[in-house]
Amino acid sequence: LVTGGAGFVGSAFVRYLAGQDSTTILVLDALTYAGNLANIAPALTSERVSFVKGSINDAPLVSALLREHCIGSIVNFAAESHVDRSILGPGEFIQTNIVGTYTLLEASRAYFNELDKFAQAKFRFLHVSTDEVYGSLGLTDPAFSETTAYQPNSPYSASKAASDHLVRAWFHTYGLPVLTTNCSNNYGPYHFPEKLIPRLIANALAGQPLPIYGDGSNVRDWLYVEDHCRAIASVLAGGRLGETYNVGGNSERTNLQVAHAVCSILDELAPSKDGPFSRLISFVKDRPGHDQRYAIDARKIGAELGWMPSETFESGIRKTVQWHLDHQDWVRDAMSGAYRDWEQLRCRSRTGCVAENTL
Ligand code: NAD
Ligand code: TDX
């Protein structure tokens, strides 16, 4: 069962798994503004992949699906995932990320207790989480390890931290066989254009300002989404029960560096007659409580499971820009409707609005 499998990372995992082995996959996704069946359309043509529209908060539905489909493992991607939205409206984040995870855990516990010993030994509940639960690093601090204390700073990261704690407690108290991954910033195909990298590419191609919050010095550790999917698959296959695994790209970049990287690839692949795309870089009002730096120490997953990223930032960002150029229809669809409403809300609330251009 892959929850949230029509979103950015979840759909990459469905595409990855559908192309890898003979696993049967059931996708459960509420199809919020961030979910898009087009992301998994080719995978859905396979007899091994099926889809149910529904919420992880719907306990009867989840319980029925677990039993009807004899689910062997759950990978939980379903979440509200955008920090800026969590600042403007935290309620959905509490409902989906905390109450939804709790609902999924309780349904899983009841189901797990009905399984025979053989099925119980194989059952896994893998919870997909984020590096943001660890808070913010100074420029010279060591990277986040699995033993770094949780210090979430945004409603989004606090809700993810809460869900991680629930998952941990269901292992220690009830013996549910759980695994948790905490990953750094992903980028790649089908990334919803409210997030930094796809927003930069889409705005540049439309000749719009490239909004950089604050002075652009905030640092993220970027990981190509397919590398994240391989990490999740390896933790699912060989991770130690109850353990957490940090996943990162070893690719720290400031947001300004990311913007320049995107611009120079676009200058090469889709030059503008008006001059270099970097002319569009525009500093806007900062995100409240903006974490300065994230960095991941991924030595544990490397040592225990042999995982390491296969893309560098340079190779991954080039693939990502090329994907956008090749999938303009998808980008156009994604940027209609709910996306336009969100851009208007940003401007009304004066957060990260491209029209505003004020520090
Ligand atoms: P996303 O917003 O692109 O996708 C979330 C998906 O969950 C959507 O398809 C949405 O329809 C679905 N969903 C939302 N509420 C639901 C509910 N109640 N029931 C069922 N489905 C629901 O997010 P993403 O970027 O793909 O992130 C997926 C997961 O990975 C999240 O848990 C996030 O915290 C985690 N993560 C993401 C990143 C990243 O950089 N994107 C990094 C680390 C961890
Ligand atoms: O327009 C923008 N301008 C800008 O400067 C946007 C959208 C973002 N930013 C900055 C804020 C961050 O420092 O870029 C950085 C990345 O921002 P986001 O793409 O919104 O990602 P972030 O807040 O770092 O969180 C992401 O990575 C961790 C995902 O959205 C989370 O779901 C994941 O857990």
Image: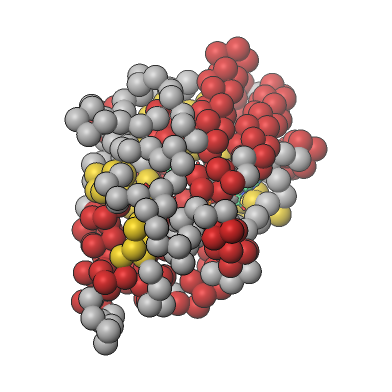
In the picture, measured across the screen, residue 232 lies left or right of residue 347, that is left
Q: Is residue 9 visible?
A: yes
Where is residue 168? Give x, y as percent. 53, 20
Residue at 57% from the left image edge and 29% from the top image edge: 163
Given residues 289 and 175, the one toward you in this image is: 289
Given residues 109 and 289, the one toward you in this image is: 289
Q: How many numbered callouts?
A: 0
Given residues 142 and 216, the one toward you in this image is: 216
Where is residue 243? Give x, y as percent. 43, 22
Residue 267 location, quadrant: bottom left
Residue at 62% from the left image edge and 64% from the top image edge: 341
Where is residue 53? Give x, y as percent. 71, 54
| Residue projecting furthest to the bottom | 273
**69 lies above or below 155:** below
Residue 256 location, quadrant: bottom left
**146 lies above or below 298:** above
Residue at 65% from the left image edge and 49% from the top image edge: 28
Q: Is residue 342 visible?
A: no
**125 lies above or below 308:** above
In the picture, measured across the screen, residue 321 lies left or right of residue 329, that is left
Residue at 65% from the left image edge and 56% from the top image edge: 31
Colour mapping: secondary structure
Which quarter of the rendered picture does the N terminus lie within? top right
